[in-house]
Image: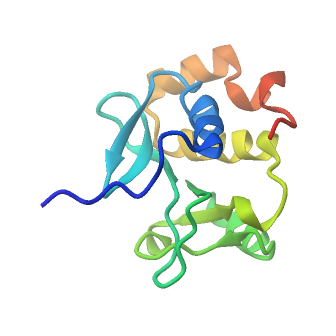
Amino acid sequence: MAHPRMYDDDDPVLARVREVALAFPEAVERESHGRPTFRAGESGKVFGYFGHGQSGRPRPASILVLAEPAEHAALLADDRFYLPSYLASAGWLGLDFAAAEVDWQEVAELLDGSYRMVANARLLAVLDATGGPARSPDSRGRT
């Protein structure tokens, strides 16, 4: 049985997340469990989830990223971050866009770190050569 779609394609926050996430080398979007996921390559691993919350507390305007273990405590000290249901044990953290004004440069940097944790060596070389969206002035400050 397919999962029901739990997002709106016309959501302007999702549009901005797509713009940033799909700017990584060979990034693709694929729906999984009713939500958009962003993957490092057509058959690559997920580096971002959109709109995944916690049991009993949906967070439709949010993104999940893999964070370096050394960064977890610092990020969780910020009220905008949370431990997502089912995925926290695998190292995923959520950033709730409804908690404060979105810093799109920060989003690009978080996605960059997450992408680097799952991408293969070839894609990482392309990212390092191009700089990616975290180094792009287009990702700064737009809401």
Q: Horizontally, is 38 left or right of 127 in the view?
A: left
128 w.r.t. 107: above or below: above
The quarter holding residue 59 reads: bottom right
Q: Which residue is painted at 84% across and 23% down in the image?
A: 137
Q: Which residue is painted at 25% across and 60% down in the image?
A: 3
Viewer-closest of 62 and 82: 62
107 w.r.t. 133: above or below: below
The quarter holding residue 115 reads: top right
Q: How many labels does the image show?
A: 0
Q: Which residue lies furthest to the bottom in this view?
A: 56
Q: Which residue lies furthest to the left in this view?
A: 1
- In the image, residue 26 lies at what x, y percent? 45, 22
Q: Which residue is painted at 34% across and 54% down in the image?
A: 5
Name the quadrant of the N terminus.
bottom left
Viewer-closest of 85 and 55: 55
- In the image, residue 123 lies at what x, y percent? 48, 24
Viewer-closest of 66 and 19: 19
Q: Horizontally, is 101 left or right of 61 in the view?
A: right
Viewer-closest of 91 and 100: 100
- In the image, residue 104 lies at what x, y percent? 78, 41
Name the quadrant of the C terminus.
top right
Q: Horizontally, is 122 left or right of 95 in the view?
A: left
- In the image, residue 38 lies at what x, y percent? 46, 40
Name the colouring of the figure.
Answer: rainbow
118 w.r.t. 81: above or below: above
Q: Which residue is painted at 61% across and 29% down in the image?
A: 19
